Amino acid sequence: MKRASLLFLALLSVTFPCFSQWNARATMTNPRGQHGAIAHPNGNIYVWGGFVNANVFTDMEIYNEATNTWSTGAPIPVGTRGQAFALGNDNNIYSFGGFDAGHLNISHRYNVSLNTWTSLAPVPIAVWEGTAAKAPNGNMIIFGGENAMNLVQIYNPVTDTWSSGANLPIASRMHSAITDSNGLIYIIGGWTGSVALSDVQIYDPVMNSWSTGTPMPTPRNQFGSTLGVDGNIYIIGGKVSGGNNSGPFFTTAEVYHVATDSWTVYTALPIGTGEAESVTINNGIHLIGGTTTAYVNSNLRIDTPLGLEEPLFSGINIYPNPVSDVLNLEITLAEASAFTLQITDLAGKVVLKETHNSGAVFKASLNVKALPSGAYLLSLSTPSEKIVKRFVVE
């Protein structure tokens, strides 16, 4: 598991495999964006709150995956949009904060079996467009959000009390928060208040500490995100503006591979969509609602996974890092191939570019003694794949 507070070495992998396509399923009654959406073990998807323009909703719609039909659930007591939410260990749905004519500190639990909402202890700092994830011990953790951009607020559902965690290293809102199979929580992308982020911030709820992962290829915020059945994190659509219903909206989808700290490209959406929600259910992913320049009631599904292409660069080691004179490379390739090796500084200036034809193993020693001190990016690329590693010259 990733425990370090700083990773000097990052890996980016982009490939272009073929996947199944997005298919339209039965639509919601109401168009909406900035809503809550939870896939439940009972086979239903629960969608509540959200808004269209100035109209904030209380209603809940329930989608039955098996019958491809929608029904109505109990409305949340207070209308909200941009709320944080998570599924509890008790299989009930938890909804926190949001916005309606001001930042909200409301907390509610939806009992799925009884179709009832219960008010809980309010969020200490009201927050909009923060995200929540469940820790292994069952606590619900809210990360960032407008009005609390760097805060980590932790709810204990057993005692109905709140506490604080270590602050977000990069303050943001409109990001995702996904818990992996090891109990680490990934905060991906988001909005700083001025720019969209590509950062991957990794929170360890046991150690109450942060580390970093490889940045997302496309900076974005207010996208769909979900943990796939393959254990990877899917990032779908989104945008780069911080304004409501403000495009342009992305069709692109990208997959973060937790085990290898790498990214691949996934099947694009048929239309650019932001402010939507994604869930995983029955070996597939749904993207529900959002805006495509107008708020929509769409419900798109794609079957996953079909298996990602094995990357060409299957093993990469560069050392020492940091380096003062000679940087050693050891690269394992899945097959013999030509590739381009390039070093750039963080401003994008190319300081080295070479083309190589290699067998299964490529080794090289690069003299970097003449480079000014600082961070550099070493990339290996073919027409269909690119890997980037970061190293530091002392």
Image (cartoon, rainbow, N blue to C red):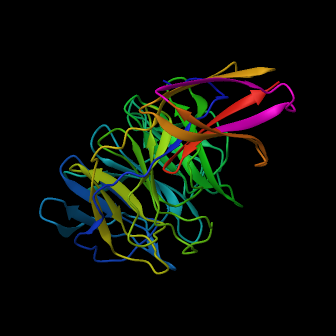
Query: Seen from this angle, which residue lies furthest front?
Result: 357
Q: Looking at the image, which residue is at 39% across and 77% down?
A: 296
Using the image as rendered, state which of residue 165 and residue 6 is in the foreground: 6
Residue 374 in magenta? yes
Q: Is residue 180 above or below residue 84?
A: above
Of the pair 117 and 276, the residue shown nearer to us: 276
Residue 122 seen in this snapshot: no
Question: Which residue is nearer to you in this view: 380 or 23?
Answer: 380
Q: Based on the displayed image, in which of its 4 quarters is residue 138 positioned?
A: top left
Q: Is residue 194 magenta?
A: no
> Which of these two is toward me, 141 or 250?
250
Residue at the far left in the pictured view: 67
x, y (%) of residue 17?
Answer: 37, 51
Q: Is residue 173 left or right of residue 256?
A: right
Q: State which quarter of the image contains the C terminus.
A: top right
Is residue 245 visible in the rendered structure shown here?
yes
Vertical side of 326 occupied by 17: above or below? below
Q: Is residue 252 above or below residue 133?
A: below
What's the residue at 39%, 47% (across, down)?
86
Left/right placement of residue 57 relative to residue 365 reads left
The secondary structure making up most of the magenta span is strand
| Residue at the (32%, 63%) spot, across then down | 47
At horizontal 62% and vertical 33% (from top left) the residue drawn is: 166
Segment colored magenta: 359-378
| Tally of marks | 0
